[in-house]
Image: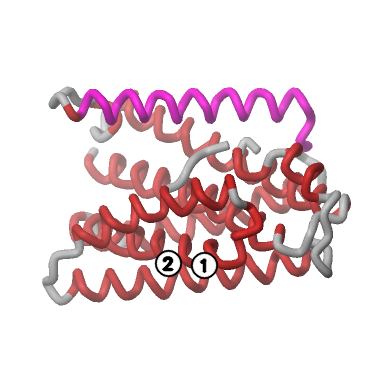
Amino acid sequence: MAIFESNNPVLKQKTFEEASRIHDGGVMTIGGTVNKVAFLLLMVMAAAVYSWGLFSKGENVTPFMIGGAIGGFILALVIIFKKEWAPYLAPAYALAEGLFLGAISAYYGSLYEGIVLQAVGLTFGTFLAMLALYKFQVIRATEKFRAIIITATAGIAIFYLIAMVLRMFNINIPFLHEGSTFGIIFSFVVVGIAALNLILDFDMIENGAAQGAPKYFEWFAGFGLLVTLVWLYLEILRLLAKLNRR
């Protein structure tokens, strides 16, 4: 998974304001962005099917899991700082994340029957629900709302970073992986924050199109939305695994 920031840090307001001053022969549209998102999702699914297939044949997919995660992280950093490269690197990011997701999903699927299909269904169901809430203005991306979600997401990212460092010293935080009551509540909260990030992403995409951001921002926005969807899927998968352990 890449980074969290709009608060997907990838889709910040300042980013669109700066890019709106630059035109490279076309401007960003919502329809064009939707097409880019659909294409990137297809790339993710194709790569995921490949690594899952290797797992089902009994092959070691750990290199795909680790390589995909690290590769996706590096590509995400490059895209964030070189937004104009998004048309070329966003598909590569999608492939890297697909390899990672396919491998880790196959592992979870071998432990808990049906968990992957449930996680995929809940992820896209949540996406559609958030889109409906945004379109009908049930939830609006106000400045206060934005500040709360950005702060919560940053807090989760810092907590996960601390947990990773502690794990290097063989110190584990039990509720991160165990199906205790507190662990399940924690996962529900994180899933909720990830889902609410979608509202900010939709708002940034709409603003980018309204402000006439350059055409390559369709790829950049598609990449940003994919970052959130990958995070959401992983958190739902983790939550379902905890529930299955009870």
Q: Which residues are magenta?
A: 140-167
Name the residue: 60% across, 70% down: 38
SS type, badge 2: helix
In front here: 21 or 196? 21
Q: Decide: is 18 above or below 165.
A: below
SS type, badge 1: helix
Q: Are marks 2 and 1 in contact (CB under 8 Å)?
A: yes
In front here: 163 or 124? 163
Name the residue: 22% across, 41% down: 245
Answer left or right for 27 relative to 83.
Answer: right
Look at label 2 and name its amino acid.
Answer: Leu
Q: Position of residue 1 (x, y in %)?
A: 42, 48
Asked whether residue 237 is drawn in magenta, I would say: no
Label 1 Cα crowd, 10 Å radius (few <14 / some 14-19 / many 20+) = many
Q: Which residue is mark 2?
A: 95
Label 2 Cα crowd, 10 Å radius (few <14 / some 14-19 / many 20+) = many
| Quarter in which the C terminus is drawn | top left
Q: Position of residue 200 (x, y in %)?
A: 69, 41
Name the residue: 73% across, 46% down: 133
Dividing the picture into quadrants, the one containing residue 138 is top right
Main SS of the magenta part reads helix
What count of labels does the image hold?
2
Name the residue: 45% across, 28% down: 156
Asked whether residue 157 is drawn in magenta, I would say: yes
Q: Decide: is 126 above or below 137.
A: below
Answer left or right for 98 relative to 215.
Answer: left
Q: Which residue is mark 1?
A: 91
